[in-house]
Image (tube, rainbow, N blue to C red):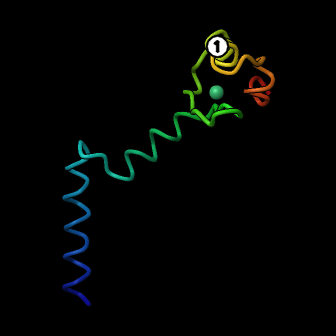
Amino acid sequence: MGNGAKAQQKRERNSDKNAAKGSKSQAKSNEAAKSIICATCKQAFFVTTRQPALEEHSQNKHGKGIAECFPTFGK
Ligand SMILES: [Zn+2]
């Protein structure tokens, strides 16, 4: 097992270097930065997204109010 574990570690380190390819850890941190989710279409928005932008999304995309698409916003 010893050798196998070492090889595995090496692979993981190599994949860290190839983050440009889109490693899983990178995708995960990107998802964490987006925590506002539209209840209607499940589109994710960055936590820093301003209310007017969310209102625009709700109205332009769904013809709904912000409270319907983002019920948890500001709570
Ligand atoms: Zn939406």
At a point 64% along the width and 31% down the height, the residue shown is 36
> Is residue 17 shown left or right of residue 60?
left
Residue 68 is drawn in which quadrant? top right
**Helix, strand or loop under label 1:** helix
**Neighbourhood count class around disc 1 (C-alpha, 10 Å): few under 14, some 14–19, many 20 upward:** few
> Is residue 50 shown left or right of residue 21?
right
Tell me residue 61's x, y (percent): 63, 19
Q: Nearer the viewer, residue 5 or 65?
A: 65
Q: Amino acid at mark 1?
A: Asn
Tell me residue 16's x, y (percent): 25, 53
Residue 63 vertical placement versus 24 (above, below): above
Residue for badge 1: 60
At a point 23% along the width and 57% down the height, the residue shown is 15
Q: Check mark 1 vs ligand 1: CB closer than 8 Å? yes or no.
A: no
At a point 79% along the width and 29% down the height, the residue shown is 71
Residue 33 vertical placement versus 11 (above, below): above
Look at the image and tell me in which quarter the C terminus lies: top right
Tell me residue 53's x, y (percent): 61, 12
Residue 14 vertical placement versus 7 (above, below): above
Tell me residue 65's x, y (percent): 78, 17
Residue 4 vertical placement versus 22 (above, below): below
Ligand 1, seen in the image, is in the quarter at top right
- Residue at the bottom extreme of this rendering: 1
Q: Nearer the viewer, residue 45 or 57?
A: 57
At a point 46% along the width and 47% down the height, the residue shown is 28
